[in-house]
Image: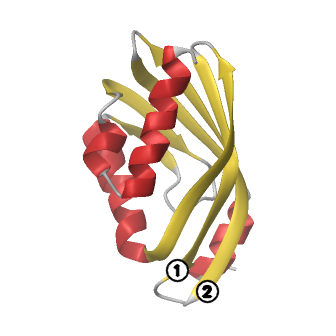
Amino acid sequence: MHPNIQIIADHYAASDRGDLAGMIAPFAADIRWTEAAGFPYAGTYVGPQAVAEHVFERIRDEWDDYTVAIDELVDGGDTVVGIGTYSGTYKATGRFFAARVAHVWRLAGGEVAAFEQFTDTELVNRATGGD
């Protein structure tokens, strides 16, 4: 297994354990993390702490049983793609959702330099009451 794909596999394993420190450990100090337009946390966040605060901590606080189940990792060397399914129940509405997702990871020097998310934001927004 290429080292970059292992870095991403380790990130997802940390996510499965609820290990925030492990999730952000491979992030470059200036990582650019982009959540899809229309997603509840849409935007680009710079730096591991910004990603933790504006994405991971909000998901933890606002959702029950939120999961990222990655079915496949595609090894493109410095670009790794994770394909899977998001699911969870939004606490404020009690609504469940499941939506397919693709994550595009860009790595440099053994660190995650950039991330971009692609998902069906309409399915997520129905759960949050944004329908």
Marks 2 and 1, the one that precedes in the sequence: 1
Residue on which disc 2 sits:
95
Q: Is residue 4 left or right of residue 39?
A: left
Q: Is residue 54 visible?
A: yes
Q: Amino acid at mark 1?
A: Tyr
Q: Is residue 72 above or below residue 91?
A: above
- Residues marked 2 and 1 touching at CB (< 8 Å): yes
* Residue at 54% across, 89% down: 93
Q: Residues within 10 Å of mark 2 (few under 14, many from 20)?
A: some
Depth order, front residue of 37/28: 28
Q: What's the colour scheme?
A: secondary structure
Q: Amino acid at mark 2?
A: Arg
Q: Is residue 130 visible?
A: no
Residue 53 in the image: state x and y as whole percent.
Answer: 29, 54
Determine which quarter of the picture holds residue 38. Answer: bottom right
Is disc 1 placed on a helix, strand or loop?
A: strand
Residue 4 in the image: state x and y as whole percent.
Answer: 51, 19
Q: Is residue 7 left or right of residue 47?
A: right
Residue 17 in the image: state x and y as whole percent.
Answer: 38, 56
* Residue at 68% across, 78% down: 126
Q: Is residue 131 above or below residue 47?
A: below
Q: Residues within 10 Å of mark 1 (few under 14, many from 20)?
A: many
Check residue 90 in the rendering and tell me which mark sits there, or answer none.
1
Identify the residue at the far front of this view: 1
Depth order, front residue of 45/75: 75
* Residue at 35% across, 28% down: 26
Image quadrant holding the N terminus, namely top right
Is disc 2 placed on a helix, strand or loop?
A: strand
Q: CA distance from mark 2 to mark 1?
A: 6 Å
